[in-house]
Amino acid sequence: MTKNQENLTKSKDTHQVDDKPKRRQLSPEYKKKILTELEQTQGKRGAVGEILRREGLYATQVATWKKELEDGIAGLWSKKRGPKPNTEAALRKKIEKLEKRNAMLERRLGNAETIIDFQKKLANMVGIELPEKDMPRSEDD
């Protein structure tokens, strides 16, 4: 390997470039700021081009934003990518989960009450006196 080839391989290793650049996500606040800034510079020679170069934007992007704003498209300022959340399905799923939990807790309560009743009967048979406490019972009793 020659000296030039070694230098080339070293430079490739130290300066890695991503395969695919990431797409910029511009917030609604940023778009609104740029549009107002461009409106304020109307009539000044070269000011619009300066702002576009500084921000790395194209005139067509800004024109699209302006048109959508004039047409009253609310989605311009709050577009979310991906599937829309299905709140009704999420609520149904949560209700189903809570109903299952409620049924499980009711079964456990019934088992606990059965065990307590058995312990009381056993205590009476053996002759152990239990203190009387007014404990709330389930609706089944």
Image: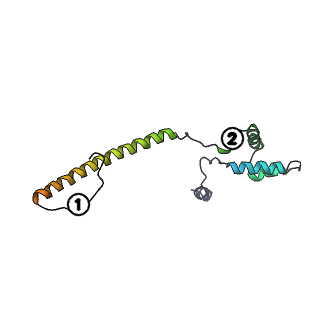
Circle 1: element type: loop
Circle 2: element type: loop
Taking the view exactly as shown, the residue that stands out farthest to the top is 71
Badge 1 crowding class, 10 Å Cα cut-off, few under 14, some 14 to 19, many 20 or more, is: few
Residue at point 53% right, 41% down? Answer: 85
What is the quadrant of residue 16 in the picture?
bottom right
Mark 2 and mark 1: Cα distance apart in space: 68 Å
Three-letter residue code for mark 1: Glu
Residue at point 20% right, 52% down? Answer: 117
- Quarter of the image with the N terminus is bottom right
Front label number (2 vs 1): 1
Cβ atoms under marks 2 and 1 closer than 8 Å: no
Three-letter residue code for mark 2: Ala
User: In this rendering, is residue 58 above or below 125?
Assistant: above
Location of mark 2 (residue): 74
Residue at point 10% right, 59% down? Answer: 126
* x then y, percent, for residue 63: 77, 41
Left or right of 23 in this view: 37: right
Location of mark 1 (residue): 132
Name the residue nearer the viewer: 125 or 96.
125
Badge 2 crowding class, 10 Å Cα cut-off, few under 14, some 14 to 19, many 20 or more, is: few
Residue at point 64% right, 46% down? Answer: 23
Which of disc 1 and disc 2 is earlier in sequence? 2
Q: How is the image coloured?
A: rainbow
What is the quadrant of residue 131 in the picture?
bottom left
Can residue 56 be seen here? The reply is: no
* x then y, percent, for residue 56: 74, 50
Can residue 70 be seen here? The reply is: yes
Which label is found at residue 68?
none
Name the residue nearer the viewer: 71 or 136.
136
User: In this rendering, is residue 60 above or below 47?
Assistant: above
